[in-house]
Image (cartoon, grey):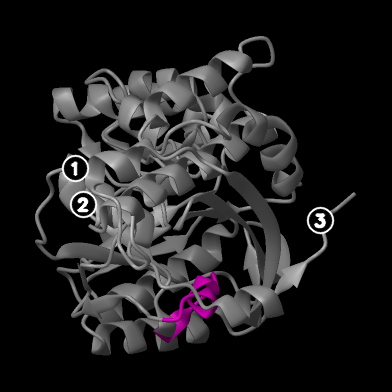
């Protein structure tokens, strides 16, 4: 092949994976936040690069305190290097089978997720087309829910009001705020939010596993039902997913659940008509894009509502092709995640609608200088 020429699709997808690298970045937040009882001043991500000849695919996720870079290099990379670009499902099956004795959670599952995401991005890069096109999606704008209203150390109601005003001015109509840490404060926060965004805007409540029983969650919902919230997300810990099903089946509360579930099998049980009202898949937790697709298969067949958790650059392509109500972003107007600092090109969001990119893979243009600037050593 002459210099500057590219292989055809079949030849490109047959290329073997040469190397996998992983590193951590820590991005400072604009201000400190109380995230479900923990005061944070930065966000930590793992970045994975999968290389095959001239092509590079990138995966990413929150670290949540785990040394995922070690897990990628030591446990997943040896299973993947040498496989063809196109052999994603086969590679995922082999890696999942290797964890049969240790279960489907923990660092191994999340490392598999990030590598799988990078492999799908690599496939799109090799084909030179966006993944939503590879999967047969259409470029219809996708409703984008704004993550906002984290508890502040002071002036919690006033801060929420200011955020809501900025987001409403930018055209957002769908909002999600933390809920359940302080019943009295939640009343004031919801009243302020509803006053700013009006009666027709969607407001979702993220409990962040604040409750321990159906009775406790039901009482908290009843106290704010007059503000017409759309659904209650994550009332219980991920390990209590059966309790979430009980709450959904025994009450009229719309329950959204699943963002921290690793097992595709558990996600399938949540996605039955006898499960929860809305499943919240997250490819960075559910063993990657491949795990996401397998985990959401039952919900797609049953017509259960699907609303993926964060990482909109990733999940927008999946929603476009495989279905879902909306995605969610931490908008620049009220940024609480800081992922935007790692992008060289920001997403196209107009009036609260996400417009898909025509760039290959997941369409992210990474700020390589920022990745190096925020890079940090792995925890020992």
Q: Is residue 16 left or right of residue 73?
A: left
Looking at the rendered structure, the secondary structure element under dot 1 is loop
Task: Name the residue at 42% across, 56% down.
Answer: 310
Q: CA distance from mark 3 to mark 1?
A: 35 Å
User: Is the residue marked by circle 3 packed among few (<14), some (14-19), or many (20+) residues within 10 Å?
Assistant: some
- Is residue 84 a member of the stretch shown in magenta? no
Whole-percent x and y of residue 10? Answer: 25, 39
Task: Give x and y (percent) for residue 69.
Answer: 71, 48
Disc 1 marks which residue? 135
| Image quadrant where residue 244 sits | top left
Marks 2 and 3, how far apart at CA? 33 Å
Q: SS class of the residue under badge 3? A: loop
Say whether disc 2 or disc 3 marks the residue closer to the N-terminus: 2
Q: Earlier in the sequence, mark 3 or mark 1?
A: 1
Left or right for 234, reference 95: left
Tell me if label 1 and label 2 are in contact, CB under 8 Å.
Answer: yes
Residue indicated by mark 3? 378
Residues rendered magenta in the picture: 333-344
Does residue 357 lie above or below 154 as drawn?
above
Which residue: 21% across, 38% down? 305
Is residue 170 positioned above or below 57 on the image? below
Residue closest to the eye, 79 or 96: 79
> Which residue is rendered at x = 34% and y = 58% of the image?
362
């Amino acid at each position: 092949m002459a210099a500057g020429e590219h292989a055809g699709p079949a030849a490109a997808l047959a290329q073997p994976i040469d190397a996998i690298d992983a590193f951590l970045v820590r991005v400072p937040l604009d201000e400190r936040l109380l995230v479900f009882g923990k005061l944070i001043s930065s966000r930590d991500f793992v970045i994975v690069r999968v290389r095959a000849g001239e092509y590079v695919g990138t995966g990413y996720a929150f670290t949540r305190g785990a040394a995922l870079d070690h897990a990628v290099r030591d446990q997943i990379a040896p299973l993947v290097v040498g496989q063809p670009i196109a052999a994603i499902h086969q590679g995922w099956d082999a890696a999942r089978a290797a964890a049969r004795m240790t279960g489907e959670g923990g660092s191994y599952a999340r490392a598999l997720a990030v590598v799988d995401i990078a492999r799908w991005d690599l496939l799109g890069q090799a084909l030179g087309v966006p993944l939503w096109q590879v999967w047969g999606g259409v470029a219809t704008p996708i409703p984008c829910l704004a993550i906002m209203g984290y508890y502040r150390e002071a002036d919690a109601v006033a801060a929420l009001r200011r955020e809501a005003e900025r987001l409403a001015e930018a055209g957002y109509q769908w909002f999600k705020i933390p809920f359940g840490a302080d019943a009295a404060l939640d009343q004031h926060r919801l009243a302020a939010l509803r006053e700013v965004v009006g009666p027709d805007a969607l407001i979702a409540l993220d409990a962040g596993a604040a409750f321990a029983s159906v009775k406790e969650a039901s009482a908290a919902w009843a106290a704010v039902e007059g503000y017409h919230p759309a659904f209650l997300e994550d009332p219980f810990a991920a390990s209590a997913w059966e309790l979430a099903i009980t709450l959904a089946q025994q009450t009229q509360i719309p329950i959204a659940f699943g963002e921290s579930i690793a097992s595709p099998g558990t996600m399938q049980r949540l996605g039955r008509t006898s499960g929860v009202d809305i499943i919240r898949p997250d490819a960075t937790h559910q063993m990657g894009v491949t795990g996401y697709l397998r985990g959401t298969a039952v919900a797609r067949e049953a017509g259960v509502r699907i609303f993926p958790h964060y990482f909109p650059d990733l999940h927008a392509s999946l929603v476009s092709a495989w279905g879902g109500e909306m995605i969610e972003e931490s908008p620049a107007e009220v940024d609480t995640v800081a992922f935007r600092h790692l992008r060289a090109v920001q997403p196209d969001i107009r009036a609260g609608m996400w417009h898909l990119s025509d760039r290959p893979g997941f369409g992210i243009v990474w700020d390589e200088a920022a990745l190096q600037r925020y890079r940090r050593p792995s925890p020992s």
